[in-house]
Image (cartoon, grey):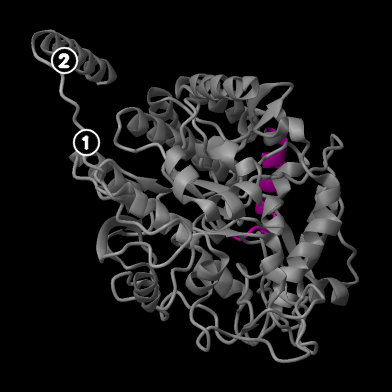
Amino acid sequence: MKKMSLMGLTFVVVLSACSTAVQPATSVTPPKVESIVTPAGTLPITKEKTTLKVLVEGRPNIDFATSSATKWVEEQTNIHIEWQVAPEGPESPVKLNVVLASGDYPDVIMNFHVTSAQQLNYGKQGVFIPLNKLIDQYGPNTKKYVFDAFPATKDDITAPDGNIYSLPIVNDCYQCSMGQKFWLYKPWMDKLGLKMPTTPDELYNVLKAFKEKDPNGNGKADEIPLSGSIQGNHTGLDEFIMNAFVLNPTLNTTSGFSIDDAQHMYVNNGKITPSFTQPGWKEGLKFLNKLYAEKLIDPQAFTQNLKQLKALGENPNIPIMGSSSSLGTGQITQYGGPSNRWSEYVAVPPLKGPSGLQVAPYTPSATSTGEFIITKAAKHPEVAMRLADFLYDPDVTWRLQKGGEGLNWRKPLPGEMGANGKPAEFATLAPIAEEKSNNNWLQRGLFATPDSQRYTSAIDPKAPKPLPLILFEATKDLYEPYKQKPDTLIPMLFMEADQGKQVVDHSKTIGTYVEEMFARFVTGDMDIDKGWDAYLSQLKSMNLDKLVAIYQTAYDAKKKK
């Protein structure tokens, strides 16, 4: 298409030159097109009511069309948003692909985490427009609160051709950067006189004591030493324990074995390396199989969702769950719930494995790319850019992400302190319930929030230590000393369209197979020693080598920049 455009331009120039030779040239000044937006950084954004069509991934608690948060945005900006809402979950990328294939594009695509391959592909086709000049002209908040505040972000979102095709969400989260944590129920440990485990064998002894010594004191063998979930952040059985045997970075996955975005992979001497083919993975499987064979692992951990896991943690009247991996205890219990069990689980430092490996996988980037894209359908792309820039304003972020004042939060009273030991910036009145509130855009839109904001809510000095502070201290004291080395990290990678398609295709097949075999090996349905070579052979036939090679090419290109 670029060649055709250039040919057309050349033809016009030649004709003009010929015409000039025959007829006297006349000076024509093209009419000046006045922008409909106000100067950058001012409100309202448009002089007259303007409509933008926005395709967004939905959330259960938000009706974008009727949300008071949407009404507030429209009042501030003079922009009416015509929403196309895709369901959250597996159907979301399907909806996006249907829209992209149809050619009937919205003005803006928001919160779909559009892949780097799609950005490059549709960017080169002209469907996604480059944002570089729009950011320069209309993006003071983008430059100040995103690029300046988080310097790595601009490189993360810049494609190999130098263009920026999408704007990101930046959610700075120190506790999330080393999120593969593990939690033990301390009252049981105290009752049984158990010490914090430092090795897999010591963890085995703790779990065995949980099962056999009736730590909840009800005279029944109803204790579940270890459980987990196939949903949530780092709640899979492999998330923590495997790192004692092989480096197993999983990022913030919602499924234990997605290989997308180079999960379950790391760099070893410059080479992309899958965790799940290494000898250490085999040894880790044997350890987990031992736990399962002795009924120390909950069989439901291979199938249950996060709600079911939390129900175990909040079992009425008496605790029954001894441990689980998770980003935080708010996933395995009800944070703020009446049982207060969320405050009774304690973090376990990385275990030292038989080879001496002791590591906490590290995710340094807080950037989620592909969150705000302007398509060629936008008649006024500057309006869309001004809206994006408006969303990055910290006051706007506060209103949209925390809900309305007097509903979900209030201003602090004199003397109220935050978890950081400084005067509080707000006090929480009610959590933003998934199923009830419609006064926010929680985790939707655009925002760039610093980690420090997590510790500014007023705390009750008589209440248990707030969860954000528990997570911060656990990360700093227990996981930071064992943080994954920088030269083993895989950075954000851009891929060409064909590469990206192959990654998606191969990853789905391989990820499903690895997940299936993980469960079979751990539960004893497949003998680990007898089945290991066949497992590796099957991965090879599923084009694992090709998948790794694609990542290697993209990684090498990134390193050369």
Image quadrant occupied by the N terminus: top left
Determine which quarter of the picture holds residue 202. bottom right
Percent across and percent down for residue 301 are 56, 58
Residue 30: numbered disc: 1
Percent across and percent down for residue 113 are 44, 47
From what the image shows, is residue 339 above or below residue 385?
Answer: below
Q: Which residues are magenta?
A: 282-298
Helix, strand or loop for disc 1: loop
The foreground one among 108 and 194 is 108
Question: Callout 2: 10 Å neighbours few (<14), some, many (20+)?
Answer: few
**For the stretch drawn in magenta, what is the main secondary structure?**
helix
Percent across and percent down for residue 121 are 36, 29
From what the image shows, is residue 545 above or below residue 168?
Answer: above
Question: Label 1 is placed on what type of residue?
Answer: Pro
Q: Residue at x 73, y 63 (%)?
A: 183
Percent across and percent down for residue 330 are 63, 70
The foreground one among 151 and 430 is 151
Residue 16: numbered disc: 2
